């Protein structure tokens, strides 16, 4: 269905309406169809089956979740989860990544805020599979360019451990601890299968930003900076 056009920060649509023609006398007056172009101030609205719907709600809920629960410590790292996610998104943006990759970078660890497991689960020998939790949660609003990149960011770590001789030495102690629970470095067979996945390359990029995004007090843009990016890559809701 294509009944709207996004123009940067605007949404332009043709709206039909009915009017009576004044050139006809009252006995012959009949309704004629006309249309006008409406420009709304942002991409927060879509026209679905004749109804204008706001669809920014899910974006605000995701940003609220990051804001409310992101202040927790990030698994023994010197930054909070929110600082980590913001740094990861910032590195993606600095690298001129696509909007969907920037969104994936911002949201890649949101599964930690959804699975309800304690911060020290790795020390307890548990893997919360936060990448799968996040991908399932985000699939309602985002396409696979976001959800699969998020889902594969843990597999990308296992892949890099198997294929980049210098990579494992750069991992933090917490990340090495969780690596074992996540399956350890990939075998040659697993690495070959991983490379064939459509979002593998971008997941590896995300993983490298993920590993860097642990710098205390780094000055980066806040959550509000990414609201328009999340809206831009959101799926149009279905009625
Ligand atoms: Fe992360």
Image: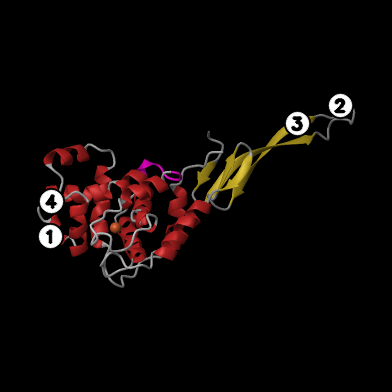
* Gap in angstroms between the C-alphas marked 4 and 3: 68 Å
Q: Locate ligand 1 by image quadrant.
A: bottom left
* Gap in angstroms between the C-alphas marked 1 and 2: 85 Å
- Residue 12 location, quadrant: top right
Sequence-first tag of 2 and 4: 2
Sequence-first tag of 1 and 2: 2
Sequence-first tag of 3 and 1: 3
Q: Position of residue 32 (x, y in %)?
A: 75, 31
Q: Name the residue tied to disc 4.
A: 164
Q: Name the residue tied to disc 1.
A: 169
Sequence-first tag of 4 and 1: 4
The reply to whether the residue tagged 1 has its Cβ within 8 angstroms of ligand 1 is no
* Mark in front: 3 vs 1: 1
Could you tell whether 118 is left or right of 12 in the image?
left
Label 4 CA crowd tier, 10 Å (few <14, some 14–19, many 20+): few
Label 1 CA crowd tier, 10 Å (few <14, some 14–19, many 20+): few
The kind of secondary structure element at disc 2 is: loop
Q: Name the residue tied to disc 2.
A: 28
The reply to whether the magenta stretch includes residue 141 is: yes
Q: Is residue 44 above or below residue 222?
A: above
**Contact, CB < 8 Å: mark 2 with mark 4?**
no
Label 2 CA crowd tier, 10 Å (few <14, some 14–19, many 20+): few
* Gap in angstroms between the C-alphas marked 3 and 2: 12 Å
Sequence-first tag of 4 and 3: 3
- Magenta range is 140-146
- Image quarter where the C terminus lies is top right
Q: Position of residue 14 (x, y in %)?
A: 62, 39
Q: Is residue 74 above or below residue 202?
A: below
The kind of secondary structure element at disc 1 is: helix
């Amino acid at each position: 269905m294509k009944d709207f056009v996004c123009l940067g920060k605007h949404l332009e649509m043709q709206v039909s309406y009915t009017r009576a023609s004044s050139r006809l006398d009252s006995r012959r007056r009949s309704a004629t169809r006309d249309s006008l172009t409406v420009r709304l101030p942002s991409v927060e609205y879509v026209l679905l089956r004749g109804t204008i719907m706001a669809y920014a709600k899910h974006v605000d809920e995701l940003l609220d979740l990051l804001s409310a629960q992101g202040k927790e410590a990030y698994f023994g790292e010197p930054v909070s989860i929110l600082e980590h996610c913001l740094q990861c998104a910032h590195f993606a943006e600095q690298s001129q990544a696509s909007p969907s990759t920037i969104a994936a970078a911002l949201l890649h660890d949101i599964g930690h805020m959804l699975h309800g497991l304690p911060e020290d689960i790795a020390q307890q020998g548990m893997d919360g599979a936060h990448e799968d939790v996040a991908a399932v949660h985000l699939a309602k609003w985002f396409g696979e360019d976001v959800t699969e990149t998020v889902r594969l960011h843990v597999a990308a770590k296992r892949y890099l451990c198997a294929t980049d001789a210098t990579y494992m030495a750069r991992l933090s102690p917490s990340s090495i601890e969780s690596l074992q629970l996540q399956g350890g470095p990939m075998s040659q067979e697993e690495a070959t299968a991983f490379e064939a996945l459509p979002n593998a390359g971008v997941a590896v990029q995300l993983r490298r930003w993920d590993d860097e995004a642990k710098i205390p007090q780094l000055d980066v843009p806040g959550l509000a900076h990414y609201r328009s990016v999340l809206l831009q890559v959101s799926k149009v809701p279905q009625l």
